[in-house]
Image (spheres, rainbow, N blue to C red):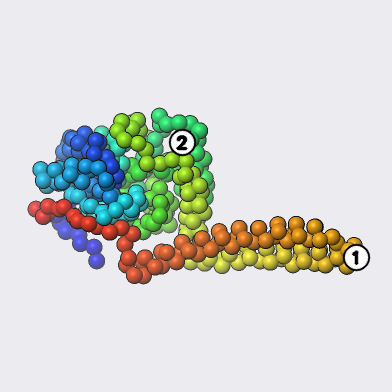
Amino acid sequence: MENVTKNNPTLSVVIPLFNEEESIGELYQRLKKVLDGLGKEYEILFINDGSTDRTGEVLKGLFQKDEKVKVIELRTNFGKTPALSAGFDHARGDIILSMDGDLQDCPEEIPLFIRKIEEGYDVVSGWRQQRDIPFFTRKLPSKVANWMIAKVTGVNLHDFGNAYKAYRREVIKDVKIYGDHHRFIPALVKGMGVNIAEIPVRNEPRRYGQSKYGLERIYKVFFDIITVKFLLSYSTRPMHILGPIGSFFGLLGVFLGLRLAYLKIFYGDKLGTKVSLSICVLCILLAVQIITSGLLAELLVRIYHESQGKPIYIVKQILEHSPS
């Protein structure tokens, strides 16, 4: 059972960090000003995702001077999704808000998320309407990916990739996320009957360091969309998707075999045509086999983690003040 006490804060702010030493000081000062002005009990959880710069030292200094700061240090760089998962697991607030630590998310907009949650929504997602990023390498692929995710999942959001989101505790605590699936949390909780809202937020240009995302993310998102659709619609009945696909290609194989036999018997079909058809069929079947094997592997990974309780991250240490 989850440890819930009367001393739990109202708000937990979860911030994953990887090599953000230059941003942390300003981020903390701006957070403190906003959170102190809310008039609510809060905690700030910084997750150091295996940083190789001075991020760990800076966070230790913040912990030593502020009892509302909690630091979770992971043993290596596991990635954004595991880092967020670590934060969600250790957050105690009734409302859990996640944001990036690179100063592109503006802490001054936190009250907008809280207000929406208090209106009765269970998930509030930030929409970066204006982004100062390259059009062809970042903005266009992002728009296409968001459109595809919305169509496939049925969740009408414009910006799935933004980590700036707020959740009710009882919603996010029941969500298991793997791989790079943090962007799909609204889709994964849709089946729980939650109310999801989207609010426009500012997105400041990155001032320090370099973006952790590149063009290699595009093809990963494509396959993540296939995986999430499978998990949302077919995870408990995989034969409903694999059966029709297998039947289709089975019938296609029978048809091609009968056609080849017909051509051979009546027209003395040449080897070239037969080889070409065989290669075509082989390639199609191989592609289907690889994709479906990938889907089954995703399912097995979840069974493995959840049945054995194996975490997707390893904590090196936790710096935490005793609850008052």
Q: Amino acid at mark 1?
A: Phe
Left or right of 197, for residue 33: left
Q: Residue at x 80, y 67 (%)?
A: 258
**Residue 99 occupies quadrant:** top left
Left or right of 89, for residue 257: right
Q: In this rendering, is residue 111 above or below 230?
A: above
Left or right of 13, for residue 268: right
Image quarter of the N terminus: bottom left
Rendering coords of residue 145 (x, y %): 49, 43
Q: Does the image show residue 67?
A: yes
Task: Return the disc, 2 or 1, that comes first in the chain's sequence.
Answer: 2
Rendering coords of residue 302 (x, y %): 41, 64
Q: Residue at x 45, y 66 (%)?
A: 300
Q: Amino acid at mark 2?
A: Arg
What's the CA distance linking mark 2 and mark 1?
56 Å
Q: Which mark is residue 138?
A: 2
Rendering coords of residue 123 (x, y %): 35, 48
Q: Residue at x 22, y 48 (%)?
A: 45
| Residue situated in front as seen by the camera: 135 or 129 | 135
Q: Callout 1 environment at 10 Å: few (<14), some (14 to 19), or many (20+)?
A: few
Rendering coords of residue 245 (x, y %): 63, 62
Q: Secondary structure at mark 1?
A: helix
Mark 2 vs mark 1, foreground winner is 1
| Residue situated in front as seen by the camera: 282 or 199 | 282
Q: Which mark is residue 266?
A: 1
Q: In this rendering, is residue 289 above or below 150?
A: below
